[in-house]
Image (cartoon, helix red, strand yellow):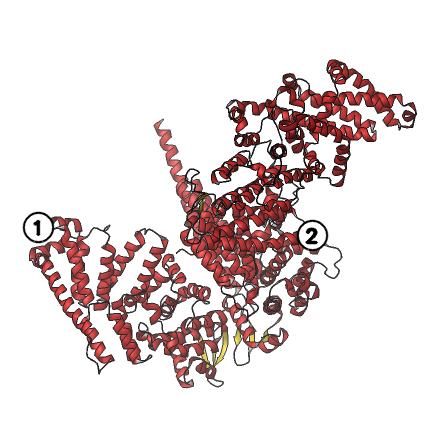
Amino acid sequence: MAEFDLTTRMGQYLDRHLVFPLLEFLSVKELYDEKEMLKGKLELLSNTNMVDFAMDVHKNLYPDQDVPNSLKEKRSHVVTELKQLQMETDLITKIFEDPEVIRQMQSSRDGRQLSDFLYKEHGFKAEMVETLYNYAKFQYECGNYSGAAEYLYFVRILLPPNDRSYLDTLWGKLASEILMQNWETALEDLNRLKEVIDANTFSSALLSLQQRTWLVHWSLFVFFNHPKGRDLIIDMFLYQQLYLNAIQTVCPHILRYLTTAVITNKARRRTVLKDLVKVIQQESYTYKDPITEFVECLYVHFDFDGAQQKLRECESVLINDFFLVACLEDFIENARLLIFETFCRIHECISINMLAQKLNMSPDDAERWIVNLIRNARLDAKIDSKLGHVVMGALAMSPYQQVIEKTKNLAFRSQVLAMTLEKKMNMKDKEAVGWGGHE
Amino acid sequence: MSRFFKGSDSESESSSADEEINIPQKPAVTAKAFQFSDDEEETRRVVRSAKDKRYEELRTIIKQLRNKKNIKDMCAILSDFENLGKAFEKAKKVVDKEGIPRFYVKILVELDDFINECWEDREGRKQMSKNNAKGLTTLRQKLKKYNRDFEQDIAVYREDPDLGDDDEADEDAAEEDSEEEEEEDEPTVTYSKKSEPKPQAVDDGDDSDDYWNMSSGEESSSSEEEGPTDFTKLTAAYFLKKESDKKEIKKKPKKEKEKRFIKKDEDEDIDEGGEWEEVTKGAAAPIAEKPKMFPKDTEVNHEAVCKKLVEIISARGKKATDRNEQIELLKELLTIAEANNLGAGIAIKVRFNIVAAIFDYNSNIATCMRPEMWEMCLTYVTALLDLLTSNLDIIASEHVHDESENLQTPPYRIRGCVLTVVERMDEEFIKMLQACDAHSTEYVERLKDEKTIYEIIKRLQEYLEGRATTEEICRIYLHRIEHTYYKCDFSLAKENVEIQEDSEKLMDRLCKYIYAKDVTDRLRTRAILCHIYHHALHDRWFQARDLMLMSHLQDTIHHSDVPTQLLYNRTMVQLGLCSFRCGFTKDAHNALVDIQSGGRAKELLAQGLLLQRQHERTPEQEKIEKRRLLPYHMHINLELLECVYLVSAMLMEIPYMAAHEMDARRRMISKNFHHVLRMAERQTLTGPPESMREHVVAASRSMKTGDWKACKNFVINEKMNTKVWNLFPHPDRVRDMITSKIQEESLRTYLFTYSSVYDSLSLHTLAEMFELEKQVVHSTISKMIINEELMASLDEPTQCVIMHRTEPTRLQSLALQLSEKVGNLVENNERITEIKQGNLFYQKGNRDRDQSYQQNQQNWNRRQNRQQQRAY
């Protein structure tokens, strides 16, 4: 199933630290050679300060070798640096530990007000923000995400939004929250970051494209873990032109996640699908996987056998996808429903056996499933059990009905119109009278 | 001709720049040189040029007159004489200043003699035709009257006609130059001698003779300053010997006069452009005597050559300058420089100037170079490039100032931009192609040079890469792109051919560089368009489409210059053809509709001028438009274009018409297609189709009835193959595509048209009827059902389409229409009350909505296209 694995493609748009969960997931799935996975991890760790983790990985990779000295050196180096930074920030942390400051911080939402307060009361200096930022970054690199998030929170409040590193702060905060799996806060941070990116006019279109691409990728973590995520992902990816463009130009593979989100979203599926199909068709030459192909089969070619085939493939793709593994059940169920729904719209009479085969179910299950659908009034149909058929109710609207539909509210509208006119006339009359009286 | 005469016009007071050039090298006359470089000279020059012009005019007429005199065509002589009088009137101003020119008097005398002679010759007069006789009489009277004004001058002249003889000689100056030399048994001169490095040993007299000869050849004007009395004799020949042996030479021309005269006539008879030939000869003479450029004892060094170069090119652009000779002179200088091993710096500098002189050759920008010139130009540019590439340390750019030039020692710094030279060359090439008839062998001959030019551009690009500014690199890249984009890469067809970089990669590399580095929007726009064109040409539809959408050019193209708009049109057409080949007929239609709808495709693609009935275009406008025309080898076949458009329109329109037959208001997808259909319907008698258009119309008719086979046979047959389909790179693939499309669309049309007749239709039967796979039939019908185009549903167990009897009866559809109209009425009422209420805001809002709605209907094609655009 490695051919549909997107980790390598996604990796280039993610932070090092964000790739670890993906790699962990992959090593559990055993898609790739264990050794290579470990090597990849080690490579990934080389630029971070998570030396202990790196040592572990090294031990796993080469059980018979000692940990190389370079790592040990690095460790001591990191430790000393950490200590030094800690010393530097000691003063600042103390300020923030002051209960009054905390109170002030919670009460005042405005960064300027707060920093004024800090400057005045606690001898806070402008450079301190930078120190704090550096410390937070170091913490993050060491893998201490909660610490990083905490400090970055302060930095964000204290930094003016036009500062150079403001954006970096936001990215760092988002990454930390994601890695700590605080989805609620992560979503907040995501929205804040999005606002900044949308509002900010970067020097070049290319730069904003890049920023958006990154945001699209990072947001996957949030959207597929946050309960409301699947609604939001549609809003952001499909209906915000800028993000859709970014996806189409740079990373069409995101369509997989978008498609999955659409299919598993019961409420909005109908309206959204048409737009999605358009996008998928447009991009079909650059990106294709069983999930998008499933949609294409179903809504472009009306090839139910093909859709069925693809659905089976989808299953294996979803199992091996870090983000989508959670919604496997949901996806399969909804995909079946989609097939059936489309089928019903086209057909008048379907044999249950065939349907069962198309839906990848046993005939009995299929019958039960249909019965449930009918009972829940989602379907206007009857089962002819003698022939083993499902017979759809009449769908077409007769011309009589159409005429009635069209003319139904005309009377009411005309009445309203007449009334307003009448009012108007009365007003005029009054006015005329008024004038007359005056004279 | 005129140039030549003008040049050798010896009596003009006229010093020439060239003369002044020569003088400094002759210590004896340095004083004079100073005189010339005086400021005064400037003013005098203006006078002379006016005079030159008038005299030249006179001379031309005189010459014609003499010719006619020889054949005794009295009528012509009369009219010439009248012209002469007029021209003389014009020249009055000059004449007042200078006195009546001697040659004028002379012709009067000659004419007088001639007429008297004729008049006397009664026999001859009787034999004359009536016209001629009449002419003679009139002429005689007129001349008599006219000559009265000049009596005095004529008398003077008659006294001393000798002087006049010289005058004549002077007219033949250039010829003399060469002839004389031959006759004088001087070493004969040929071009081949050019390469001889050193002056031939000649005696002093000859030397100076050659020197003067040279000078007259160069600029062919000499100076009055030599002595006021000489002013009639300042012929080249005269000058030649003046210093050493005046008399002898003076006689010589006289002696040879007769002979020369004949010879001259012969010369002119032999080739009509005689004067050109002669001048070249005249110029050839000095070449042989190269030393004359520099006096024998002068050391030919950098300063001398530079100085000389400056002298030569300072004559550039002046009226009196013979451009041909300038080229020759520069060539000569180059030979000398090379012979003396003055290094690459000088060689390059001179070559720059030669090429510039060649470009200067044509004063009119509308006309093109002559082929010989062009070939010369090519060789020189190539040589220039050779030199530059072999001496990489040379800095040649337009940013080098004249003062900071360094031609002597490496590192050389030279002012001159090879890129501009090549750009200009490219322009000339297009002009030459425009001037040729596209179906002549001449065109083919010229087109062969395309390869050379491409090579030059390629080499220049390699040369510039890494040493020029990004801006310049962008420019040369664009040139290479523009020479590449319209060519189909046939190396792709042959799979086993090894090439280091196919055109796709090349285009990609060059264009991306321009996208990244270009600052002028124009280059980028052009590069994008060429890139799209190239993608489209090679059937890379998706890339081409995405690039087009990403470029957002649809919105801004109206603000760009005309050639770019033309390129845009070409690109859209190519995009349309590409999408057609790839089977996206709808996109093909959308891309082509703008070009095709006005019926002005030819003009929009710059492939020819259209005859406009409404308004005549002015000659200037026509000229401009002609200059924009593309050379034939870049054309897109218009018939192919129209056919593709019509076929894709047919594939969309016919099913649509079938589906909406009952609709009261149905809109047209393609107006052009409807127009064609209507035109065909109007014909009283329809024979078997002949033209492409008739074929498509016939096909549409059969498709209407769902007869796909007939439709296919009309679209794809021998005639259409040769006319249209075989023009595609893979005609078979296209034909297959068209066939399957026709099958599908015929099926749809069939279902729309006949569904009311059926209660149920078997999928099997349909599949058989249209020879489609069941899968395809199923999916087509499913699509129609889902889109609610077809009121039916499938019966899975029996594999049938069951029609729902929903097609309204006549009454029902009328009722539906009525209800719709009532609805509209109510809506209108509401709107009107809103307006009456004076609620401006509502009113405005409503109107806007309405308009946009209408627009949507009208240009939905384009709209859709635009909506698909992407931002970064």
Total of numbered circles in the picture? 2
**Chain to which mark 2 belongs:** B
Q: Is residue B241 left or right of residue A403?
A: right
Amino acid type assigned to the residue bearing label 2 in the image: Ser
The residue tagged with tag 1: helix, strand or loop?
A: loop
Amino acid type assigned to the residue bearing label 1 in the image: Gly
The picture quadrant where one finds residue B689 is bottom right
Residue that carries the numbered disc 1 in the rendered image:
A123
Percent from the top left, x then y, of residue B400?
A: 42, 42
For the N terminus of chain B, the quadrant is top right
Q: Which residue is drawn at 23% across and 55% down?
A: A165
Between B546 and B229, the residue placed more toward the observer is B229
Residue that carries the numbered disc 2 in the rendered image:
B440
For residue B438, above or below residue A73: above
Between B622 and B830, the residue placed more toward the observer is B622
The residue tagged with tag 2: helix, strand or loop?
A: loop
In the rendered image, residues at marks 1 and 2 fall on the same chain? no
Callout in the foreground (1, 2): 2
